[in-house]
Image (cartoon, rainbow, N blue to C red):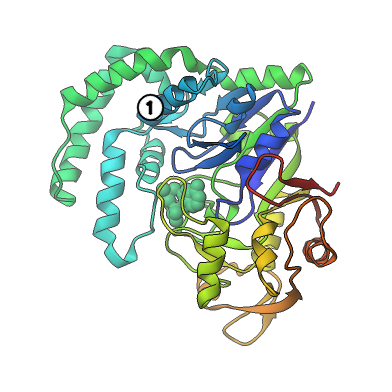
Amino acid sequence: MPATVIVGAQWGDEGKGKIVDLLALDSDLVCRYQGGPNAGHTIVVDGETFKIRQIPSGVLRGKICVIGAGCVVDPEVFLAEVDDLESRDVTTGVVHLSGEAHLIMPWHVAIDQASERRLGKLQIGTTKRGIGPCYADKAARLGIRVQDLLEPKILRQKIEVALAEKNVWLERVYGVPPLDLEEIAGQLEAFAQRIRPYVSDTSLLVDQALREGREVLLEGAQGTLLDLDHGTYPFVTSSNTVAANAATGIGIGPNRIDRVIGVAKAYVTRVGEGPFPTEIEGADQERVRELGGEFGTVTGRERRCGWLDLVALRYAVRLNGITSLALTKLDVLSHFAELPVCVAYQLRNGTETLEFPAHQSDFHHCRPVYETLPGWQEPLAGELPPAARAYVAFVEQALGVEIALVGTGAERESVVALR
Ligand code: IMP
């Protein structure tokens, strides 16, 4: 049985949580393959709002949930989420955490915060959750993994070795107070007792599920343009967000993936720094932000808002091998009489291109070429009005990919299936 990947096709916050929640209905397993508590899903169930950062949102449907090897896990955030879900009668017995996933330690958070401060104007605008420093230590082979929680002696040794070095950095490079070994070791030992029951061989678990013919959903965090290799570097996150990494991040072969569903907003948002060609100028930006509730789930930061960018979306289709798209939050555009859509970029030399520039300076300096489509200016419920259908058809035609789902509101039910 094949696996389906769901991937953000823009800069994150595309509303993946809601699409995953919907598709989870017909799935047996929901798996996260990268990222950590920098992601945030907001899901509204029967008027009750759930904000989930670390655990796959499939937990709300009682599905088996996997946090794969490619993820980074903040044990404190994970346990707080477990407590919150359990206190609201959502069972977390279905959650399986890869022993190969890396732990976000207090020094990762401290360094993320201090290094952003130090960069000043050049800062990336991270979520300050320790994501970059944790992945950096993973690559440097200094990381502490979930499985280390199962071996108290090894855990303590690793904390000691890492902290000796990190405290030098914290004090001498960043000029912030050092962290206390006993305090951290004690805290981690307490977390270990509680996390132990969740630790599994998740690669094997997913493989067995696929062999048994079960439906597996592989859920990406953040979005394509935040991919470490292919995104708008250096204003990216520190993992590969693209669909291909679902195989690596879970530990299955790429040939197990059959479908790739891209999720894109009907407009674009971006949090943090970095170039953003279709960022709206003037009062309409504020209007989109208010109408769309565009404030970060994790950080509460205002999201920058822009018109739909088909050049960037075409790039996302290419990078991920997107087989169909879900276009979310179309209702936010109901309030506008005219809807600019970016169909090409004009480069510094005056030429126009449909393809995303490979060189970062070309991207920094490009200007959006807009085509303006008529708005529909009526609420969306049930059947889409003709102008809204035309907007969707325009996007499909420009990208050569079908739009299977359209999001028309925050509630779980507010989705129109076109296919
Ligand atoms: P980090 O992932 O915290 O290191 O942040 C790196 C960049 O990714 C920053 O621009 C963040 O705003 C952005 N980012 C990280 N997670 C998300 C997300 O879930 N949604 C949108 N942007 C994100």
Q: What residue did someone put label 1 on? A: 75
- Quarter-of-image position of residue 96: top right
Foreground residue among 293 and 373: 293
- Quarter-of-image position of residue 125: bottom left
Foreground residue among 156 and 61: 61
Left or right: 326 as drawn, with respect to 30: right
Left or right: 188 as drawn, with respect to 397: left
Quarter of the figure that contains the N terminus: top right
Left or right: 353 as drawn, with respect to 289: right
Q: Amino acid at mark 1?
A: Pro
Q: Secondary structure at mark 1?
A: helix
User: In the image, residue 396 lies at what x, y percent?
Assistant: 81, 60
Q: Residues within 10 Å of mark 1 (few under 14, many from 20)?
A: many
Residue 251 shows in this picture? no
Q: Is residue 98 above or below residue 381?
A: above
- Quarter-of-image position of residue 94: top right
Q: Residue at x 42, y 19 (%)?
A: 147
Ligand 1 within 8 Å of disc 1? The answer is no
Q: Residue at x 47, y 58 (%)?
A: 271
Q: Is residue 315 above or below residue 223?
A: below
User: In the image, residue 64 lies at what x, y percent?
Assistant: 62, 21
